Image (cartoon, helix red, strand yellow):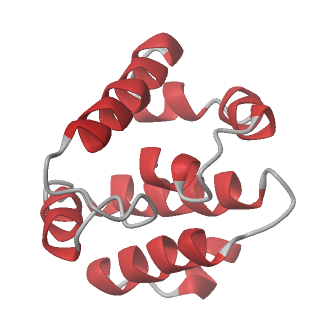
């Protein structure tokens, strides 16, 4: 979800408001401040990577897939995908990097987009 929040290069206030409005931290079983700190820490790690050449390409596919594979609970996977979709739409535009992250996550986990519409 942190990648979704940062995919367009801006952590918009509407995205943070969506986190609160939907109670996403609580659904994930973490405190809001803990989730925000995790997002900030993730940004710092990405920016400190020495191999980072292109500022738009913040994460390679292998690293992304390793992150996805750490989540094995099907219920949590679906919840993460729903949150990614809502957060992507929070600022009014689902940009191409957000679309790509969501599509790749759905594909990796075998979740059809239609399942998120329920």
For this rendering, which residue is in front, 68 or 111?
68
State the image quarter where residue 63 is shown: bottom left
Residue 38: x percent and y percent? 35, 26
The residue positioned 23% from the left and 69% from the top of the image is 60
Left or right? Give the position of 60 relative to 16.
left
- Residue 94 to residue 2: above or below: below
Left or right? Give the position of 12 relative to 103.
right
Residue 2: x percent and y percent? 45, 44
Residue 51: x percent and y percent? 14, 57
- Residue 40 to residue 48: above or below: above
- Residue 34 to residue 111: above or below: above
State the image quarter where residue 29 is shown: top left
The residue positioned 73% from the left and 70% from the top of the image is 94
Residue 56: x percent and y percent? 46, 64
- Judged from this view, the residue extending furthest toward the right is 92
Left or right? Give the position of 86 relative to 1.
right
State the image quarter where residue 78 is shown: bottom left
């Amino acid at each position: 979800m942190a990648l979704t929040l940062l995919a367009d290069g801006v952590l918009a206030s509407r995205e943070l408001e969506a986190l609160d409005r939907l109670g996403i931290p609580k659904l994930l079983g973490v405190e809001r401040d803990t989730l925000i700190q995790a997002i900030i820490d993730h940004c710092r790690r990405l920016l400190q990577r020495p191999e980072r050449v292109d500022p738009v390409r913040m994460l390679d596919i292998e690293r992304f897939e390793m992150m996805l594979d750490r989540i094995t609970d099907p219920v949590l996977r679906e919840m993460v995908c729903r949150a990614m979709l809502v957060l992507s739409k929070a600022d009014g535009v689902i940009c191409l990097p957000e679309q790509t992250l969501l599509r790749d996550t759905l594909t990796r986990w075998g979740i059809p987009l239609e399942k998120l519409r329920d």
